[in-house]
Amino acid sequence: MRTLKRLFGALVMCSLFSLPVSAATLCPDGQYHADGICKLCPDGSWTTAPSCTLAPDGNYVPDYGRGTRLAPDGKYIPDTGSMVLCPDGNYYPGRNCRLLPDGRYIGMQ
């Protein structure tokens, strides 16, 4: 009984100090992406977006059905209606930044 109390106490403490982690998908490129099914873009990059689209600068970017938009840093990003500047200094589509298990950021709605 004493062991169960200690185990329960440890679980409670862990849950108090743990942050919830959203799911992420590890694609064949070895990088984590937003949760979804990995898809190969024509340039060999991977995405979990519904498809890829060719941006005006000649690079492929994930496409969520609205095309691309030019971020203030001069890079094209998916147009999701909103844009966020994350701690890594890059702009991402979305309203909030999400830290992935590999240390990169993505935007999320």
Image (tube, grey):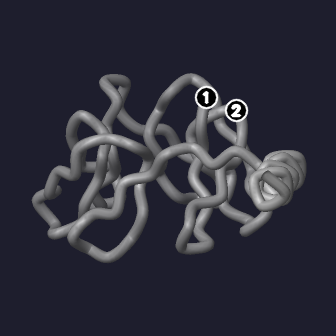
Mark on residue 109?
A: 1
Which of the 4 image quarters holds residue 53? top left
Task: Please state the horizontal and vertical placement of residue 72, each as a whole percent of the image.
Answer: 68, 51
Q: Is residue 7 left or right of residue 31?
A: right
Q: Quick one: quadrant of the C terminus?
A: top right
With respect to residue 85, does 102 lie above or below? below
Q: Amino acid at mark 2?
A: Arg
C-beta proximity under 8 Å, tags 1 and 2:
yes
| Residue 14 in view here | no
Residue at 36% from the left image edge and 54% from the top image edge? 25
Q: Nearer the viewer, residue 52 or 1?
A: 1
- Earlier residue among tags 1 and 2: 2
Residue 55 at what x, y percent from top left? 32, 49
Q: Residues within 10 Å of mark 2 (few under 14, many from 20)?
A: some
Q: Residue at x 22, y 52 (%)?
A: 38
Q: Position of residue 23 (x, y in %)?
A: 49, 46
Name the residue beneath numbered marker 2: 95
Q: Residue 30 vs residue 2: left or right? A: left
- Vertical position of residue 98 compared to residue 95: above or below: below
Q: Nearer the viewer, residue 108 or 20?
A: 20
Q: On the image, which quarter does residue 51 sit in? A: top left
Q: Is residue 106 left or right of residue 44?
A: right
